[in-house]
Image: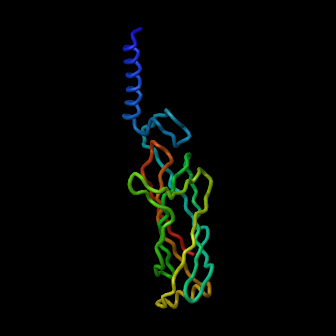
Amino acid sequence: MNSRLILAIVGAGIAGIIGLVAFSGSQFINDISKDGLGKLSPAPIEVIPLQIELANLSVIEVTDEQATIQIDFRVTDLNYKSIILQLIKYELYENGVRITTEEIGQRPEGMVDVSNYFTILSNSPQIIGEKITIKNTGNMPELWSALTNNTAKWTVKGEAYYNLSSMTSGHENITPFEFTR
């Protein structure tokens, strides 16, 4: 056979495969459900939201100058594939007054960026947390009294930003949350 003919057949086959994938979108290459590759589905792929719980919120130390608070979130992925958790952004309130706004992780900006994210494996809860330091400005004696006596009434409001760890279904997802303790 002619080598040009073989090259044309191979090229047409590759172009056909690329066209099939391009025009069928993420419905043909479904690598996030148990059905797997090649299972053509008329509906778009649905991402099950992350399950976020407040695992711990405790006052570690209180001095006249500052207070240290530990906050931990339990994050569970109920999808078939793992999730890339980019950022947990939250506000901490004590008795209805916002104390601080914090972020754990980092959302990517631009093409080249430092990867400060968490991989959440399917059905394997992961604890993600941090220590927060609050400075005593003297403007909120009620807060400092509640911290010292361990009688603070906490509310945590926030959002988790994440993507599937899939090259075919990568749009950003957001799960809001609110906890009272």
Query: In the image, residue 88 lies at what x, y percent?
Result: 49, 64
Count of numbered labels shown in the rendering: 0
Coloring scheme of the render? Answer: rainbow
Query: In the image, residue 75 lies at what x, y percent?
Result: 57, 59
Is residue 13 depicted above or below 52 in this figure? above
Query: In the image, residue 22 lies at what x, y percent?
Result: 38, 35
Is residue 77 depicted above or below 103 in this figure? above
| Residue for point 51% across, 47% down | 165
| Residue for point 47% across, 66% down | 89
Which quadrant is home to the N terminus? top left
Along the line of sight, the residue nearer the viewer: 149 or 70 = 70
Q: Residue 132, located in which quarter of the rendered image?
A: bottom right
Check the image and name the residue furthest to the top.
1
Does 174 sit left or right of 57 as displayed?
A: left
| Residue for point 38% across, 54% down | 110
Is residue 89 depicted above or below 144 in this figure? above
Along the line of sight, the residue nearer the viewer: 161 or 27 = 161
Query: In the image, residue 31 lies at what x, y percent?
Result: 51, 40
Which quadrant is home to the C terminus? bottom right
Is residue 28 depicted above or below 134 in this figure? above
Along the line of sight, the residue nearer the viewer: 134 or 26 = 134
